[in-house]
Amino acid sequence: MVAAAVQLGFLLWAAHVAIPQGLQCEVCDTAYYYTAAAEIAKSGLLFTNPYDGYRSYFVPLFIATVDWLVASVGFGGGPVERYVYGISILFWLISVPLMWRLAGRVDRLTFLTTTAATLLNPFLLVYVPFALQEGVLVACCLPLLFAWVGAKDREPSRRAALVMMMALLAYVIRASLVWWLPVAASYAAWLLWPQIRHRRRWLPWTMAVVFAGCLLIGPQVYISSQKSGSFNPYPSTGVLAQQIPWGITLLKFATVEDEGHWRGLVYWSPYAAEPEEDKTARFYRDRPASAAFLMLAHAYAGFHYDQIKPYWRLDSARPLTIWLVLSSAVVFLGVVRMTDNVRTRALDADRVFEIATLALCLASLLFVATESRFGVLGFAMLSLQVAEWLASRPSRLQWSFVVPGLAMYVALSFLYNTLLLQSADLKL
């Protein structure tokens, strides 16, 4: 299959890019996760962890497990090479049968659009080889998302179970994605309500999801109880309390290679010099115009990509790139499609789930000094909406209405990104 070959080629390219960054990048999360993976492989669940009560066991355990599997089959190299290439190949091996099954059930256009929005979406797929929360999130949830989109004719109980598993995995991977759990639960309730009296249809799948949830979250509760004396999986809120001051100080954040060294690239807010005691929630209440600007900047950063790679070379910083154009097009077309569905009341459980996921993902970014990787779930939902629209074979008249607005939005993205670059410590 051409799609499988394209995916493998992209994954191998992304893996090649990820290796030097995993070996050298000391200011990004990859350094922590490789260290934590080694610790959890050596010490078990109660491993030494500077982020106890804030980050979970799952990502280090996932990385350590992939490393062990790859090493056990005789793959050479160090932990970074083993994980990067191991997860890329494993992800590909999972994706191929999924694509094969969908190709046999739907027409070619539906297959192409669905696959392009999920398993071939470069903005999502590029994270797979990186030892990041978002990398594990994409590796675990993207195949489930693809299966969910391609299973519209399947039993509601199975589709509800797929969505709940995605949300549970997202939560245990990154605690801040807890907002996806009530969205998924509401979606599952919507689908299962007409079958509420037919327990045999939904009870086995429900019990399977509950059991899987206990397996996923149970170890984190155990760690929390042993180290913090709490049954709350994530009792630490210190970092969470710092998000509002950071959000007022920075418009967005990136990690870049600058003359052979890795560093954080900050985009300073106009309010960075405000006294620290004023950088609280009151700032957003008392200065609505400034608050609107900050929230727009944070939201923009989560869904628009300057570069395809999570970490990139500083000398490639540009106000306009092909990746900014493509991501802006997905955002514009996705929002237009969602708005039209709401306007015409063409809403079903799937569309409401996608819209609610985007809305809450957006809300989670408004007060945070956002990195582009923080918006992957919302971007995935926008991509699905665009794919659905393209699969409907829009007419020339529809395109004639959309293209002028799309061109204007891309131009506005270019202008806005130019302003953002003026606030960045580029030092070129």
Image (cartoon, rainbow, N blue to C red):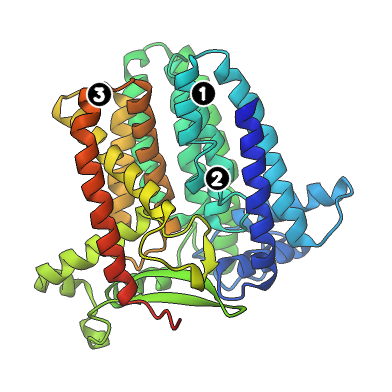
Q: Looking at the picture, does residue 169 appear above or below residue 311? A: above
Label 3, on which residue? Answer: 396
287 sits to left or right of 199: left
Circle 1: residue type: Trp
Residue nearest the viewer, comparing 117 with 6: 6
The residue at the far right in this view is: 74
In the image, residue 159 above or below residue 354: above
Asked whether the beta carbons under mark 1 and mark 3 sit within 8 Å of each other, the answer is: no
Q: CA distance from mark 2 to mark 1?
A: 29 Å
Left or right, 221 with respect to 412, comes to right
Q: Which residue is mark 1?
A: 205
User: Alpha carbon of mark 1 to alpha carbon of mark 3: how far?
Assistant: 44 Å
Name the N-terminal-most of marks 2 and 3: 2
Q: Position of residue 313 (x, y in %)?
A: 54, 69
403 over 365 or under it: above or below:
above
Q: What percent of the width, then of the height, locates residue 71?
A: 84, 52
| 2 or 1: tag closer to the N-terminus | 2
Query: From the image, which quarter does the C terminus lie in?
Result: bottom left
Residue 111 in percent (x, y) is at 50, 22
User: Is residue 151 visible from the viewing direction of this image?
Assistant: no
